[in-house]
Amino acid sequence: MHLPLNALRAFEVSARHLSFTRAADELNVTQTAISQHVKNLEERMGVPLFRRLPRGLALTDEGLALLPALAESFGRIGTLLEQFRDGRFREVLTVGAVGTFAVGWLIPRLAQFQEAHPFVDFRLFTNNNRVDLAGEGLDYAIRFGDGAWHGTEAEPLFAVPLSPVCAPAIASRLREPADLAGELLLRSYRSDEWVNWFAAAGVDSPVVRGSV
């Protein structure tokens, strides 16, 4: 089945807005042109895509089935064309990082990166310490840990010191690492953070109750 691209686009925009008028505004054409494109598409497909209501439009079952595929396809085309800004292909690089690392280390260096790679469209997402590249749509993820994450290839960047912090009132009653064993110990992401810290201090690790 050969369907006009303009008609498919007119339907997709109209379906998003549920309005021929707003679709016409977005595509910079007349409302009549949008209506005719959609009518032509419905006739070629042999099914109604909208129910025309007194105060707008409603998608039929056929329209509901068609919209997601068209929206994804036009979205991918738009994303690809956006990479040709300035007359050159711009490669998209999507990176996810823990918020504290992004703010404290990565973002201050982005200007230098962009200067060295002007045709890379760098996109940064801050999230937690989970590693799910495919699920989060990432090219790379920067995470704290040992790199033993299933389905990934990990490259160590640098070692990060692990230091306990506490309120001054708590610090005043601590004399040696073992004294921390009697306190309520909180952790951020990894369950073995305190275990490793106590091991480095030569002290048996107590049970860690939870995370924050």
Image (cartoon, rainbow, N blue to C red):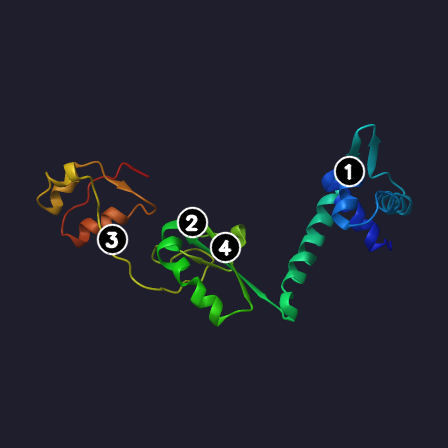
The residue where tag 3 is placed is: 162
> Is 153 placed above or below 4 here?
below
Mark 2 or 3: the one toward you: 3
> Is 186 placed above or below 2 here?
above
Looking at the image, is mark 1 or mark 4 earlier in the sequence?
1
The amino acid type found where label 4 is placed reads Leu
What label sits on residue 133 in the rendered view? Answer: 4
The amino acid type found where label 1 is placed reads Ser
The residue carrying pointer 2 sits among few (fewer than 14), some (14 to 19) or many (20 or more) residues within 10 Å by Cα, namely some
| Side of 161 where 138 appears, left or right | right
Determine the CA span between mark 1 and mark 4.
Answer: 37 Å
Q: How many numbered marks does the figure carry?
A: 4
Quarter where residue 102 is shown: bottom left
Determine the CA span between mark 2 and mark 1.
Answer: 41 Å
Determine the CA span between mark 2 and mark 3.
Answer: 19 Å
Mark 1 or 3: the one toward you: 1
The amino acid type found where label 3 is placed reads Leu
Tags 2 and 3 in contact by the CB under 8 Å rule? no
What label sits on residue 130 in the rendered view? Answer: 2
